[in-house]
Amino acid sequence: MKWRQYSAVDGFADGVAVRQVGETCFDLCQQLVDGVMTVSTTQICAAIKDVFEETRCILEPAGAVGVAGAKAGRCTVNGSILCGKQLELSVYSRITMKCLKVLLPSSSCGTTARRTAQRTA
């Protein structure tokens, strides 16, 4: 593993978004971790959607990273820790809208969101 610093990171999965891993954490990972992979925001959103459809639980984006990696087929997973911070109710709508924008074509996103809002009202 090579220690890198990124110029920018996407804040969607803010719980795991760091520009540079700390020295102690990096040293531990070199000893204990077999490999590292990255996943895209689209893959994270797909994982959030899939887990929601199967369990009716909404994952915090950082908690969905392990599921996204497993779904990408780039690792063998015997289990995944679905973790995240405490979320305020207002954050759920931000996560949902981000996922809708990423997973649906831009032309249908607003229409789908309006239909969903009308059905729940």
Image (spheres, rainbow, N blue to C red):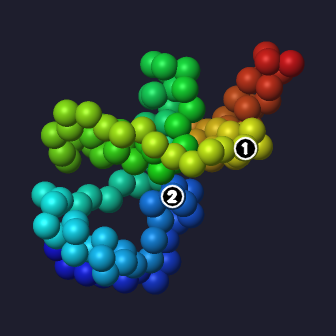
The answer to whether 60 appears left or right of 112 in the picture is: left
Please, what secondary structure does the residue beneath circle 2 have? loop
Residue 20: quarter of image: bottom left
| Residue drawn at 62 percent across, 45 percent down | 86
The answer for how far apart the CA atoms under marks 1 and 2 are is: 15 Å
Q: In this view, does 117 lie above or below 69?
A: above
Q: Is residue 67 left or right of residue 56?
A: left
Mark 1 and 2 residues: CB-CB less than 8 Å, in contact?
A: no
Q: Residue at x 51, y 58 (%)?
A: 15
**Residue type pointed to by label 2:** Gly
Dot 1 falls on a residue whose secondary structure is: loop
Q: Is 67 left, or right, of 30 in this rendering? A: right
Residue that label 1 marks = 88
Image quarter where the N terminus lies is bottom left
Q: Position of residue 4 (x, y in %)?
A: 30, 81
Residue 13, given in percent of the width and then of the height, sits at 51, 56
Counting from the top left corner in percent of width and height, residue 119 is at: 79, 16
Residue under the point 80% across and 26% down? 117
Along the viewing direction, whichever of 52 and 24 lies nearer the viewer: 24
Q: Quadrant of the C terminus?
A: top right
For marks 1 and 2, the one nearer the N-term is: 2
Amino acid type at image mark 1: Glu
Q: Where is residue 10 in the image (x, y as percent from the top left)?
A: 52, 65
Q: In which quarter of the image is residue 106?
A: top right
Q: Count residues near mark 2 (Cα–Cα under 10 Å), then give few for <14, some for 14-19, many for 20+.
A: some
Give the numbered dot on residue 69: none
Determine whether 27 is above or below 77 in the image: below
User: In this rendering, does residue 43 appear at all?
Assistant: no
What residue is at 45 percent from the left and 28 percent from the top?
Answer: 50
Q: Which of 75 and 101 is in front in this view?
A: 75
Q: To which residue does mark 2 refer?
A: 15
